[in-house]
């Protein structure tokens, strides 16, 4: 009830709010951060928004409600209503729904698998969780294989093969989600993981992984991050917890484990993509790991 009341007042005063908001340097950019990037506001950013809204409330008294103790919970409503790029946002959302060369969500086997797995699910959140668990555990984590073969990165090929590494698994999850009309993107980042198996660390000659890949999934009007790379089997072998996804909160590899061991450090973000930037990935792999290391890893026999 209170949300409907607030929406009505914001809509009624939308023009005035926008006119005044433009006078505060950086306010609109910060207000739209969560909608534009899918990255949640930090506590400090929420505090900064409330300071700006306190100043704005002198001109638009209805905004006083946002500086009350519970006001930060209502800020997403304000961002949604005053979003000037809503029309363009709807159009751009199609970019994360349509099939691509690698995210071949129009492949018959991808469509059939996605529909069959989610047949009994009640809503899109439950569907996303079901598909996440399928890719996490039914597609085993295996970083070995011909790394230069473009076809191996297609979602349908990974589904048929039954194993893959982070890029291939995230690509498959994106395809399954898009096949049932849930927008999904790929996020790339460079990470450091000191707990990787010794044979893989020896083969790569480093514990850093560039272009690590995970998903950004649009569920119930917000983007949620999820990492499906490690299956429960490898987690057990490495003595690390599995990533548990509930469709509501971001889940990526933790920096530390419950026992205090250092786990994954995110070194740098490389961006959000609607498809695998294959040529860029291979180019950077060659520069970072070296041609000979990659060739050796591609045909490495883990047994």
Image (cartoon, rainbow, N blue to C red):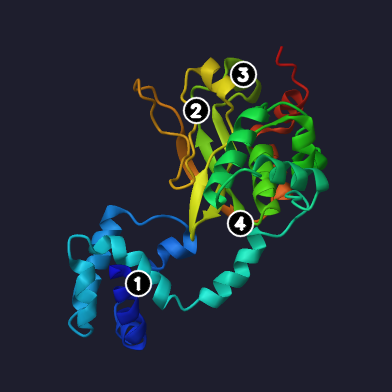
Image position of 63 with respect to 165: above or below: below
Answer left or right for 38 relative to 12: right
Q: Earlier in the sequence, mark 2 or mark 3?
A: 3
Name the secondary structure under disc 1. helix
Density class for disc 1 (Cα within 10 Å; few <14, some 14-19, many ≥20) is some
Which of labels 3 and 4 is toward the front? 4
The residue labelled by disc 4 is 183
Q: Earlier in the sequence, mark 4 or mark 2?
A: 4
Density class for disc 2 (Cα within 10 Å; few <14, some 14-19, many ≥20) is some
Q: Earlier in the sequence, mark 1 or mark 4?
A: 1
Q: CA distance from mark 2 to mark 1?
A: 36 Å
Q: Earlier in the sequence, mark 3 or mark 4?
A: 4
Q: Which mark is residue 242?
A: 2
What residue is at 32 percent from the left and 69 percent from the top?
A: 3
Density class for disc 4 (Cα within 10 Å; few <14, some 14-19, many ≥20) is many
What residue is at 35 percent from the left and 57 percent from the top?
A: 41
Q: CA distance from mark 4 to mark 2?
A: 24 Å
- The foreground one among 217 and 211 is 217
Answer left or right for 270 relative to 59: right
The residue labelled by disc 3 is 202
Q: Position of residue 161 (x, y in %)?
A: 78, 31
The residue labelled by disc 1 is 78
**Quadrant assignment, res 15:** bottom left
Q: Position of residue 287 (x, y in %)?
A: 66, 40
Q: CA distance from mark 3 to mark 4?
A: 38 Å
């Amino acid at each position: 009830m209170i949300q409907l009341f607030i929406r009505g007042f914001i809509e009624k005063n939308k023009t005035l709010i926008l006119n005044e908001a433009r006078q505060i340097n950086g306010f609109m950019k910060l207000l739209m951060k969560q909608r534009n990037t899918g990255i949640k506001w930090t506590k400090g950013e929420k505090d900064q928004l409330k300071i700006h809204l306190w100043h704005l409330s002198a001109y638009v008294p209805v905004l006083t409600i946002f500086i009350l103790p519970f006001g930060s919970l209502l800020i997403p409503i304000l961002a949604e209503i005053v979003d000037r790029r809503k029309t363009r946002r709807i159009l751009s959302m199609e970019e994360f729904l349509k099939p691509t060369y690698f995210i071949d969500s129009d492949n018959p086997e991808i469509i059939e698998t996605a529909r069959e797995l989610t047949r009994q699910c009640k809503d899109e959140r439950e569907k996303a969780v079901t598909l996440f668990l399928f890719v996490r555990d039914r597609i085993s984590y295996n970083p070995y294989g011909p790394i230069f073969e473009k076809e191996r990165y297609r979602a349908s090929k990974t589904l048929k093969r039954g194993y893959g590494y982070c890029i291939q698994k995230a690509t498959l999850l994106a395809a399954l989600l898009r096949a049932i009309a849930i927008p999904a993107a790929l996020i790339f980042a460079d990470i450091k993981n000191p707990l990787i198996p010794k044979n893989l660390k020896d083969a790569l000659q480093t514990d850093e992984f560039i272009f690590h890949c995970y998903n950004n999934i649009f569920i119930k009007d917000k983007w949620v991050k999820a990492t499906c790379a490690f299956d429960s089997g490898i987690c057990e072998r490495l003595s690390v917890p599995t990533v548990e996804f509930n469709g509501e909160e971001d889940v990526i590899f933790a920096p530390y484990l419950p026992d205090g061991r250092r786990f994954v450090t995110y070194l740098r973000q490389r961006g959000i993509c609607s498809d695998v930037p294959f040529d860029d990935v291979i180019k950077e792999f060659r520069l970072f790991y070296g041609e000979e290391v990659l060739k050796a890893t591609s045909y490495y026999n883990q047994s």
